[in-house]
């Protein structure tokens, strides 16, 4: 194999070096290599010795411009590594070759593990009424094949009276009703639109005029007119274009083509021994065989450009696209007819000087009628036969030969179908080529109305083996799918489902590796259609993508029910509850108690003691749905709750009290633990303060209660004292203010009046409302000044508290007349010697005494205490 690849590369290099093969010179022959970790895509190409450098561009698939180059690579390089990519995403590249002998281009849509296209959308089968009537079986097989690829098939059979305008109007209406409509397959000789005043093959004036324009059916909003062109000079009547003849004026499409269009039309082909019906039948049969993998084709391409024009290089459509399909090593430049008669090539290209029925050096319509060419997607180019609605037309004839399924007139312009390497159907590239102006190198006649795809536009390049059998059976509330293994299912299977009445499938599982799948909980009473598709990671010269096989389908109506039924029993022990599910048809149960959710068929729980009843709900979950059952449960609380208490009060400051718990709710018997250490239901003879008791029930639940024993504040009094003159009851107290205790208060001082007291000591007895009594000592002092006492300072006396002696010191300016010793009641005890400054008082009884000085300056008394 290595020898063959080396040989083929050598041939390509030889073509480039000799500068004789312009199809190769105008192309950059690309292929990619990928790395998944770290992710990278490497662009490889065959170097052109005349190239001066290469520019690399990258864009998203749907972007309408390339932007700036991401790299400028020297002429000596033949690769570029893009490390800024992600696995699972597609990237489109353009490599532009700069050369003094002619620039070239290469395009590739590359990816690592590009996800599969799961749903294709809607396709319209626009079918001739005769074909539809005569080939119902084959058409139904085709529709089934399309449904197996996740297409939604719409059908429209125009009548002989319908004009091309009528047909297009119907297509527009169908698009409004089916927004996912993107493709039209015209089967049979449905009326052919003609338009323009063109001769893209260069044959003027005989071939100048209106050409077939199936693009008209794909343009939903362009303005097509028949009021301008008047050119009757063409040789073929169909090409003559006269105002008002039903052929349109436009030579270029008036707006982008909206729908992909392809046609398989075998009318007017007398070169074949089979008639139109049989040729169409044969086409649909091989279409089915290809889709189901029963026709095999070698993954390689062959190109022959017998024009080899330096400025146009028609064969580049083949060289550029086939390289990224198969690798340049698997693209041959050689004889078209002879090679395809002997060997299989998935793709082929041939061009040469032509007629309506031939291409020079390629083949003829007569040969197509007898040959069995081994190719599937072919591209042809030459004079005249691009006008494909002619008798024994060479392009239409090709669809009747061998395994050929599509054909396009590729050269003016060039076609861009490189996306097919990543699984796209050929209709995508056809529409892209019709709308292309400068995004891809188009060459001559871009956006011309003549660009057309002959054949089924929904065909893709890499069909894989499908699953051969599928059975859907009910399994309780589920539907179980069982199928045979496909050798192509390297990455498992996709599971599709749709409900009767729906047009499109939904993907319900991906990459299932087993051959059994359980669809959980389809709705009872509904009819479901299931489809299984094998998935394979397809790898080629553009990278890798997940490729889906045709599907196999089975239908079943869901009849069996298995709904869950929720029920439970319970027992309570105060707030403690035991719950047991007795539910049916469940796989799981959940208890909902307040804000809590618990999972188990049998549980113990604690209800809220702040309530006397609580709702308990059981949710029974089946495989498909759930049932809920609730009960309101009444209960008593085990937690000790005091309902009656006896607590003493302390009437007088410093008294004692008791606390007794007389009645409780909860689970008895109870135990008590007081903060004082007490273990019964009461505490006694306790002073004022804070106390707590922890009460524990027979269910070992507990509650803590706090108590406060209070007492009045101690009785106290404030007042003002008035001194008494010696021997008189003119002293007392005033402004009496009593605090503490409990008002109202009574008070007394023996039997005396508070404001008529002689000097001396008394007891103030205060009694409050609780008969609490407080005795406060009061002393009424002797008034010591007889006159001017506050202004005269006659002598000093010290110490004022003594046991034996006191000392009297007269002021130097004072001339006393006498000094007198008085008792506390103001009675004179004796007269003192003025000359004796130190006086012996040892004979005096303990108590208060006064010394009084009488002088011309005034009188003054001073007190002292005999101890």
Image (spheres, grey):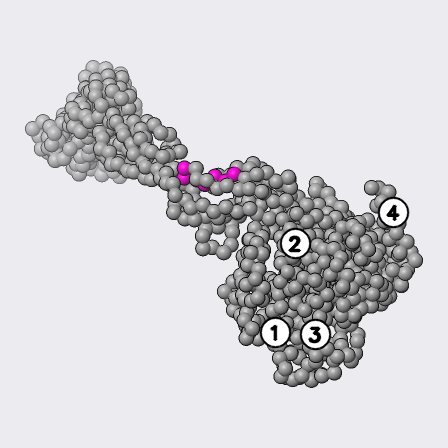
Gap between marks 4 and 3, in whole Å?
A: 43 Å
Q: Could you tell me which quadrant the C terminus lies in? A: top left
Sequence-earlier tag: 2 or 1: 1
Q: Position of residue 130 (x, y in %)?
A: 57, 66
Q: Nearer the viewer, residue 336 or 826?
A: 336
Which label number is shown at residue 222? 1
Q: Which residue is mark 3?
A: 211
- In the image, farthest residue toward the right: 18
Task: Select label 3 or label 1 by which is in front.
Answer: 3
Sequence-earlier tag: 4 or 2: 4
Q: Nearer the viewer, residue 289 or 623?
A: 289
635, above or below 237, in the image: above
Whether residues under marks 2 and 3 lie with C-beta atoms below 8 angstroms apart, the answer is no
Q: Which residue is mark 2?
A: 286
Task: Select label 4 or label 2 by which is in front.
Answer: 2
Q: Which residue is mark 4?
A: 7
Q: How many C-alpha atoms fall within 10 Å of the one at disc 2: few (<14), some, or many (≥20)? A: some
- In the image, farthest residue toward the top: 843
Left-right relation of 79 to 817 = right
- Residue at point 89%, 56% (across, down): 15
């Amino acid at each position: 194999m290595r020898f063959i690849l080396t040989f083929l590369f050598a041939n390509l290099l030889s073509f480039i070096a000799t500068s004789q093969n312009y199809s190769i010179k105008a192309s950059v022959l690309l292929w990619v290599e990928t790395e998944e970790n770290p992710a990278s895509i490497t662009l490889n190409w065959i170097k052109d010795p005349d190239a001066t450098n290469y520019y690399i561009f990258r864009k998203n698939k749907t972007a309408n411009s390339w932007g700036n180059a991401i790299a400028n690579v020297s002429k000596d390089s033949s690769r570029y590594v893009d490390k800024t990519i992600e696995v699972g995403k597609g990237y489109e590249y353009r490599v532009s070759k700069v050369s003094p002998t002619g620039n070239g281009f290469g395009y590739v849509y590359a990816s690592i593990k590009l996800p599969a296209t799961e749903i294709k959308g809607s396709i319209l089968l626009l079918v001739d009424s005769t074909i539809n009537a005569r080939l119902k079986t084959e058409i139904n097989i085709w529709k089934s094949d399309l449904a197996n690829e996740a297409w939604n098939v719409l059908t429209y059979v125009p009548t002989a009276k319908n004009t091309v305008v009528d047909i297009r109007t119907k297509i527009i209406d169908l698009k409004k009703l089916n927004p996912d409509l993107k493709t039209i397959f015209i089967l049979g000789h449905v009326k052919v639109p003609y338009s323009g005043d063109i001769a893209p093959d260069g044959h003027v004036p005989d071939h100048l005029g209106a050409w077939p324009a199936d693009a008209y059916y794909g343009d939903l909003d362009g303005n097509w007119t028949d009021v301008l062109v008047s050119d009757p000079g063409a040789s073929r009547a169909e090409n003559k274009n006269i105002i008002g003849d039903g052929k349109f004026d436009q030579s270029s499409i008036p707006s982008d083509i909206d729908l992909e269009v392809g046609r398989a039309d075998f009318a007017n082909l007398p070169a074949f021994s089979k008639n139109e019906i049989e040729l169409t039948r044969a086409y649909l049969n091989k279409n089915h065989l290809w889709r189901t993998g029963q026709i095999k084709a070698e993954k390689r391409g062959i190109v022959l450009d017998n024009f080899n024009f330096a400025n146009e290089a028609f064969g580049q459509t083949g060289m550029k696209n086939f390289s990224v399909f198969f690798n340049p090593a698997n693209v041959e430049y050689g004889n078209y007819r002879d090679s395809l008669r002997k060997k299989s090539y998935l793709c082929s290209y041939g061009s040469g000087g032509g007629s309506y029925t031939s291409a020079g050096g390629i083949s003829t319509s007569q040969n197509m009628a007898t040959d069995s060419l081994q190719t599937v997607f072919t591209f042809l180019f030459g004079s005249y036969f691009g006008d494909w609605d002619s008798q024994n037309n060479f392009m239409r004839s090709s669809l009747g030969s061998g395994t050929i399924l599509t054909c396009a007139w590729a050269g003016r312009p060039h076609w861009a179908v490189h996306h097919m390497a990543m699984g796209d159907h050929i209709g995508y590239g056809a529409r892209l080529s019709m709308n292309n102006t400068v995004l891809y190198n188009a060459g001559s006649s871009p956006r011309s109305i003549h660009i057309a795809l002959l054949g089924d536009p929904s065909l893709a390049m890499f069909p894989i083996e499908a699953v051969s059998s599928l059975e859907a059976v009910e399994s309780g509330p589920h539907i179980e799918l069982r199928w045979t293994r496909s050798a192509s299912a390297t990455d498992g299977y996709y599971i599709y489902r749709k409900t009767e009445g729906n047009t499109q499938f939904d993907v319900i599982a991906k990459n299932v590796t087993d051959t059994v799948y359980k669809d959980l909980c389809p709705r009872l009473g509904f009819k479901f259609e299931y489809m299984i598709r094998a998935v394979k990671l397809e790898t080629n010269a553009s990278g890798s993508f997940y490729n889906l096989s045709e599907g196999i389908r089975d239908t079943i109506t869901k009849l069996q029910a298995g709904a869950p039924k929720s029920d439970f029993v319970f027992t309570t022990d105060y707030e403690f509850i035991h719950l047991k599910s007795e539910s049916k048809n469940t796989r799981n149960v959940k208890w909902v108690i307040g804000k809590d959710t618990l999972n188990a068929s049998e549980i113990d729980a604690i209800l809220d003691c702040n309530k006397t009843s609580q709702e308990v709900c059981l949710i029974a979950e089946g495989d498909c749905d759930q049932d809920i059952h609730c009960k309101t449960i009444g209960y008593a609380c085990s937690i000790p709750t005091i309902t009656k208490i006896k607590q003493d009060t302390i009437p007088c400051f410093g008294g004692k009290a008791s606390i007794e718990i007389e009645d409780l709710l909860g689970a008895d018997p109870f135990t008590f633990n007081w903060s004082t250490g007490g273990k019964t239901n009461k505490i006694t003879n306790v002073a004022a303060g804070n106390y707590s008791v922890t009460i524990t029930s027979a269910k070992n639940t507990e509650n803590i209660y706090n108590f406060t024993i209070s007492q009045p504040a101690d009785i106290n009094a404030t007042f003002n004292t008035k001194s008494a003159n010696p021997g008189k009851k003119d002293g007392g107290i005033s402004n009496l203010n009593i605090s503490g205790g409990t008002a109202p208060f009574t008070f007394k001082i023996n039997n005396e009046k508070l404001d008529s007291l002689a000097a001396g000591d008394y007891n103030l007895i205060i009694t409050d409302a609780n008969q609490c009594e407080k005795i406060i000592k009061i002393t009424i002092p002797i008034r010591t000044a007889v006159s001017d006492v506050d202004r005269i300072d006659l002598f000093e006396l010290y110490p004022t508290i003594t046991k034996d002696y006191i000392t009297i010191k007269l002021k130097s300016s004072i001339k006393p007349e006498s000094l007198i010793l008085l008792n506390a009641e103001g009675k004179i005890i004796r007269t003192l010697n003025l000359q004796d400054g130190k006086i012996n008082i040892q004979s005096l009884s303990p108590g208060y005494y006064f010394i009084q000085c009488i002088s011309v300056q005034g009188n003054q008394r001073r007190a002292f205490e005999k101890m």
